[in-house]
Image: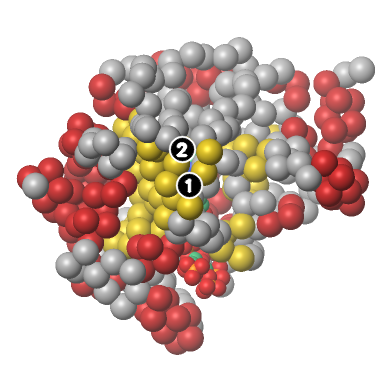
């Protein structure tokens, strides 16, 4: 049977059948469309898609984020498409690529062509025990087109946002002694005031034995690099966008293994990064969030076979991989549902970055 045929077999399971199987087995490890499984390293964000699963992990190691309802989903898709356009000549956008998960176009399940997903690099993939934090950046978490109700709702969630300029949305931290993760949800971040912020942030770097100072330093250096990009760009404003911070929690070596790619024939991506940059202006027209109570999780590495090196080559980034000390951390910008064109510096985002940097520097000084 052709690879295509195999796809049809796997994806032709109906949702009903899946639910029955899950109920029967009490199965936690769901296999969804085309061999995709729930992404086990999601620490914040919407839980949409099949069974409110949220972000999915594709067998080739990428992740799939379902497009949100217009205008947010198309706006995020247009943003990734523009930044990763093959014929992009805008130096600012080309420089921005290094700060984003790589974008592999859009993807749709063969059976449900109305469902569209962004296919993205899994930023946590190379880590053995990834410690992950999602931090929303900026002095306001609503965009200029938000209704009065939306503005008020967002402000009421964290009135300190304007003064602090960032908000911890979620994290998971590997604990060496118990070989488990501590997780904190969005309410943890919202509970932090000016006097507890530094301590609250420092928990992300504590493995139960000691503070991972090297991770703090390396993450500071990556955030500084993102700040430098913002200091010279005036094209874009980012609202309700996040930084995803990751560091290696394992005291052992970093996972450098490269698996053979999954059978490329099992791919049926639709819409490669487009060759023509799309206009942001065109996207200006105008689910339940993830909530994980504080708890200890047994460690499940969540690794899924296959690799994406061939696709890396395709977008010209395949040979840029290096492994060194700085590979034990990663900082990427994510969540671009509220990115808008502009002609001035993004002071709000930079304010947030600077305050995050100074809080991290304080943690190092203590
Ligand atoms: O998707 P919505 O309209 O429900 O709004 C999300 C909010 O849900 P809620 O207002 O409680 O219904 C949601 O609120 P919660 O954090 O879940 O209280 C977030 O503010 C989310 O923003 P982000 O994805 O974290 O950047 C919000 O998403 P964005 O408006 O930032 O896309
Ligand atoms: N490229 C990525 N690599 C790894 N994890 C990611 C990536 N993008 C998103 N995530 C995970 O999914 C969560 C939600 O992503 P996000 O883009 O913020 O979704 P939402 O728009 O629903 O807020 C993040 O907190 C993170 O845990």
Q: Is residue 69 shown left or right of residue 352?
A: right
Quick check: 246 above or below 182?
above
Name the residue located 35 percent from the left edge and 74 percent from the top edge: 158
Q: Position of residue 214 (x, y in %)?
A: 20, 32
The CA span between labels 2 and 1 is: 6 Å
Name the residue located 86 percent from the left edge and 25 percent from the top edge: 6
Residue nearest the observer in this picture, 227 or 271: 227
User: Considering the image in quadrants, where does the N terminus appear?
Assistant: top right
Q: Position of residue 65 (x, y in %)?
A: 60, 48
Residue nearest the observer in this picture, 285 or 72: 72
Mark carried by residue 180: 2
Quick check: 251 above or below 291?
above
Residue nearest the observer in this picture, 3 or 232: 3
User: Furthest-bottom residue in view?
Assistant: 148
Name the residue located 46 percent from the left edge and 56 percent from the top edge: 294
* Sequence order check, earlier mark of 2 and 1: 2
Residue nearest the observer in this picture, 136 or 172: 172
Q: Is residue 341 shown left or right of residue 2?
A: left
Mark carried by residue 296: 1
Is the C-beta of the residue carrying label 1 under 8 Å from the nearest atom of ligand 2?
no
Mark 2: give few (<14), some (14-19) or many (20+) Cα within 10 Å: some
Are circles 2 and 1 on residues that touch, CB within 8 Å?
yes
Q: Is the image coloured rainbow, by chain, by secondary structure, or in one colour?
A: secondary structure
Q: Secondary structure at mark 1?
A: strand
Q: Position of residue 62 (x, y in %)?
A: 58, 33
Quick check: 9 above or below 224?
above
Q: Secondary structure at mark 2?
A: strand
Mark 1: give few (<14), some (14-19) or many (20+) Cα within 10 Å: some
Q: Is residue 362 shown left or right of residue 84?
A: left
- On the question of residue 89 being in view, the answer is no
Q: Position of residue 257 (x, y in %)?
A: 48, 14
């Amino acid at each position: 049977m052709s690879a295509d045929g195999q796809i049809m077999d796997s994806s032709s399971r109906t949702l009903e059948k899946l639910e029955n199987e899950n109920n029967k087995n009490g199965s936690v490890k769901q296999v969804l469309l085309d061999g995709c499984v729930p992404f086990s390293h999601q620490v914040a964000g919407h839980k949409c898609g099949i069974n409110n699963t949220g972000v999915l992990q594709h067998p080739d190691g990428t992740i799939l984020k379902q497009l949100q309802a217009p205008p947010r989903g198309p706006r995020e898709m247009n943003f990734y498409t523009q930044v990763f356009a093959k014929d992009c000549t805008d130096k600012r956008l080309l420089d921005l690529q290094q700060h984003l998960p790589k974008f592999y176009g859009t993807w749709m399940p063969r059976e449900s062509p109305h469902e569209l997903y962004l296919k993205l690099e899994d930023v946590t993939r190379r880590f053995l025990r990834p410690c992950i934090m999602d931090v929303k950046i900026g002095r306001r978490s609503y965009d200029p087109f938000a209704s009065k109700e939306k503005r008020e709702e967002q402000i009421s969630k964290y009135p300190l946002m304007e003064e602090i300029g960032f908000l911890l949305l979620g994290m998971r931290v590997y604990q060496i002694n118990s070989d488990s993760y501590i997780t904190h949800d969005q309410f943890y971040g919202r509970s932090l005031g000016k006097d507890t912020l530094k301590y609250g942030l420092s928990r992300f770097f504590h493995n139960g034995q000691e503070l991972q100072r090297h991770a703090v330093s390396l993450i500071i250096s990556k955030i500084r690099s993102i700040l430098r990009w913002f200091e010279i760009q005036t094209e874009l404003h980012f609202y309700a966008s996040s930084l995803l911070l990751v560091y290696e929690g394992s005291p052992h070596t970093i996972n450098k293994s490269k698996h053979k790619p999954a059978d490329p024939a099992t791919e049926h991506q639709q819409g490669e990064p487009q060759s023509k940059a799309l206009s942001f202006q065109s996207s200006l027209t105008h689910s339940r969030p993830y909530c994980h109570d504080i708890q200890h999780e047994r460690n499940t590495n969540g690794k899924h076979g296959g690799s994406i090196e061939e696709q890396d080559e395709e977008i010209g980034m395949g040979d840029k991989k290096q492994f060194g000390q700085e590979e034990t951390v990663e900082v990427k910008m994510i969540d671009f549902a509220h990115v808008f064109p502009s002609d001035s510096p993004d002071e709000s985002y930079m304010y947030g970055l600077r305050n995050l940097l100074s809080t991290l520097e304080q943690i190092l000084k203590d």
